[in-house]
Amino acid sequence: KAYVYDTALGKLKDVSPQNSSFATTLGLRSAGSIGDTVFLAGPGLSGGVNFFAFSSSASAYIASCTASQFNNIRQWRVINNALYAGVGNTAGGGGLVRWNGTPSQPFDSTASATCGFEVVANLPGDAAYITAYGPASDRIAVSTWPNPLGAPGATAGVYLSPQMPAAGFTSSDANTPWTPLWLPSLYEPDPVTALTDIGGGIAYWNGALYFGTMHVPGLSALAHTSAYPNDTESSLTVFANTYRAISVWRIQNADTIPSVQLLYGESALPKFDPGTNTFQSTSTGYSPLYGSSGFGNVFNNYTWSAAVFQDRLFFGTMDWSYLAYEGLLGAAPQQQNPQGQNQGDSQSFFGADLWRFDSGSRPAVAENANGLGNYLNYGLRTMITSADGQNLFVGTANPMNLEAKGGWELRRLKLRNPQNSQ
């Protein structure tokens, strides 16, 4: 489905295209806009990425196109008056593309490989999250996913573009190398687990680059079992020693001499030793500045979104504790929140977290830790600041559709006191 929500009238309108391309889209995991043109996009069931263009003023569908060269798409950003999107390539790796169409003709239907989107950067991984970098927004930073996931050499990372030409990036820049700022192997001591680490939400704030990681529960255990088929450790031991909660990072002076700081994470992590057939605690080479992985919550496994709002930096997470207790154990015992205070009601522990940095010199503050009041919101999947800077829109992930409060939600958040309060 595709919807338009009228923020003034509080009304929702279904604008879903009635065509086979829309009906065979796996999911609309991506959205972007520039001027009056809005795009929704997602992987097609038969391969490629399906793009759909809409008119914002008319709240109407315009056209669609399938790009066979791409197999995934995540974020779009308008940077210096040009619209860019990060993609994964069907052949592996990924890149950054630029839209060069017009409102009346958003796609080039004769270019079936790319739908007319111009490839302006080639990257080792799927460019999942994008942010403008620098006071003049003359560089772009991305966090990437391995493509294909888990394949040797297809690791995630954080990359910084060269300085942007005055007219923006074009295809002539596609083969210009981007600078790798961070790779999972620089922190994760276990080489197999490092292959499954994924780049998460990223933002430029207060002169520095902030980002977090993402970790699919169980994926690193499967990778370990594949890499070490003769390992005699129990599956529970393997899971416990390969599972990771999110780490959160800051890179200062990224365009000159990068200074990488671990804000939330671990000074040591388990590494498998094939010689002894055991996991050994191994130094990561970093000491966290503010706290442990997951903002102190081991169930925070995705840094799913990042946004700058009212001069503060927000991170939205995925917290899979509800799935763990309800799905795996069939029960929901009373839990404690990440700060160790007994909540009495386990539902107050479940749900995604929204964390807020007020200053570059202080730890993050938990704006909310229970799915914005609905514990079934296990993820804050996307965030965007309104054009006037007065609202933070948050889209949740909530697949518990058989529950009364199941189904994704769109939330509008405001600071109570933009000067001092939360």
Image (tube, rainbow, N blue to C red):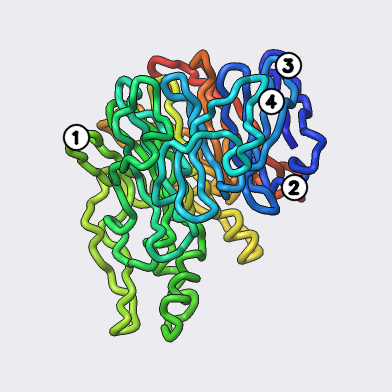
Distance of label 2 from label 3 (alpha carbons): 25 Å
Residue, x 23% and y 53% (percent of image)? 286
Callouts 3 and 4 close, C-beta under 8 Å: no
**Disc 3: which residue:** 58
Q: Secondary structure at mark 1?
A: loop
Place of residue 134 in the rendered image (x, y in percent of width and height, measured from the top left): 30, 26
Q: Name the quadrant containing residue 141.
A: top left
Q: Residues within 10 Å of mark 4 (few under 14, many from 20)?
A: many
The reply to whether dot 1 and dot 2 touch (C-beta < 8 Å) is no
Disc 4 marks which residue? 54
Query: Where is residue 131 drawn, in percent x and y?
Result: 41, 32
Tell me which residue sits at (47%, 38%) in the image: 119
* Residue that carries the numbered disc 1 in the rendered image: 256
Counting from the top left corner in percent of width and height, residue 187 is at 29, 56
The secondary structure type at the circle numbered 4 is strand
Foreground residue among 33 and 3? 33
| Residue sitting at x 59%, y 44% | 113
Q: Earlier in the sequence, mark 2 or mark 3?
A: 2
- Badge 1 or badge 2: first in the primary sequence: 2
- Within 10 Å of the Cα at label 2, are there few (<14), some (14-19), or many (20+) other Cα atoms? some
Q: Which residue is mark 2?
A: 24
Task: Answer with mark 4 or mark 1, whichever residue precedes in sequence.
Answer: 4
Quarter assignment of residue 238: bottom left
Tell me which amino acid carries mark 1: Thr
Helix, strand or loop status at disc 2: loop
